[in-house]
Image (spheres, rainbow, N blue to C red):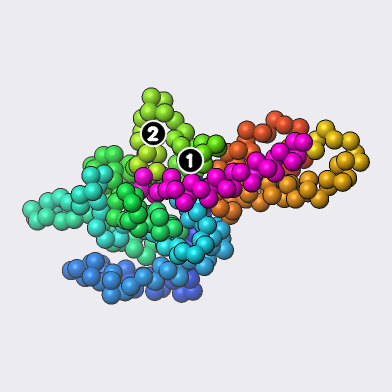
Amino acid sequence: MRYIDPAFIPICKPEDWDRKSTLWRARVQAAVDKSAELKKIKNPWRLFKDNFSNMYGDKCWYTEGQRIGTTIDVDHFRPKNAVKNISGQLVSRNNATGALEYANYWWLAYEPLNYRYSCIFSNRANGDGGKQEYFPLENEATRAWTPTCNYSLEDNLFLDPCDVSDVQLIAFDLNEGRATPRYTEEQNLTAFKRFEFSKKYYNLNEKSIIDARMEVITELKKDLTILECAWNLDQASKVIMSQAIDDAKLGIIKKCNRKSHFSAAAVSLVRTKLAEPWLQSIIPNLDLTP
């Protein structure tokens, strides 16, 4: 997972989005059955797909999986309809009149800052995972129930690619291609719990995701090995290998580019080599930020 700077999300708005979304939101707010009204308006957020792809790269913001032979969804980070807790139960409460009401974030249905570009492994039901309607909180008392609530105060369990501190809670096993927690349960219980929950429901370690991530790691290791082996060669040998060396450098730069698929794992590997003399010439060209 690489950091998705939310400051650029408004740039991705389709033409005339603000005017139209204001009208849609008003319709939903006035409706007795808000879920039904959302369905009538359908899914205009799909219009963000191309702009998200151009701005941030054509990959899932959760898994970093590339869009090949599949589709990408625009996920509502806070669900626009029903909301499930950590046990998979719909979140509900008795309101001021004593009537039972169910949690949802209908007022964020047309808010671009609530959108996340997501592969179907992360967004839809797949195996034991898939985000779906899940949005559990560590403390339900922080739940935002109305548009006037400050939802930024919610202590949610999902790691958010739009939060730079959350992104840094994910590490990688560079031998197996698995996403791993940055902290152990003993070191930071909350961070560990949030990683484990996100790993499951984002399907971070689904087999095809692991395989594709490992393919990037393997190719990157080859690039790094070429630079290391070429470092101590005599000048004549370096000239002979110049094309291979240049290709390896470009390969490393590309794999660390935040728009590239599984670049977080690539950066994790490159960071283990930062002190090596043979890497110094391209470090200024590498995007090694979260």
Q: For the point 32% across and 48% down, which residue is it?
A: 128
Mark carried by residue 192: 2
Say above or below: 223 vs 100. Answer: above
Q: For the point 26% across and 39% down, which residue is it?
A: 139
Residue type at tag 2: Phe
Q: Quadrant of the C terminus?
A: top right
Residue positioned most to the left: 98
Which segment is the magenta one? Answer: 200-229
Q: For the point 44% across and 57% down, which residue is it?
A: 118
Say above or below: 24 vs 286. Answer: below
104 magenta-colored:
no
Q: Position of residue 120 (x, y in %)?
A: 40, 59
Say above or below: 170 vs 251. Answer: above
Task: Determine contact: label 2, label 1, CB under 8 Å.
Answer: no
Nearest the eye: 200 or 286: 200
The mark that comes first in sequence, 2 or 1, is 1
Say above or below: 94 vs 227. Answer: below
Q: For the point 77% across and 36% down, which residue is it?
A: 229
Mark carried by residue 54: none
- Where does label 1 land, which residue? 178
Q: Determine whether, in the image, residue 80 is placed left or right of residue 121.
A: left
- Measure the C-alpha gap from mark 2 to mark 1: 15 Å
Asked whether residue 147 appears in the rendered view, the answer is: no
Q: Secondary structure at mark 2?
A: helix
Q: Secondary structure at mark 1?
A: strand
220 magenta-colored:
yes
Q: Judge depth for marks 2 and 1 and give the one in front.
A: 1
Residue type at tag 1: Arg
Nearest the eye: 171 or 208: 208
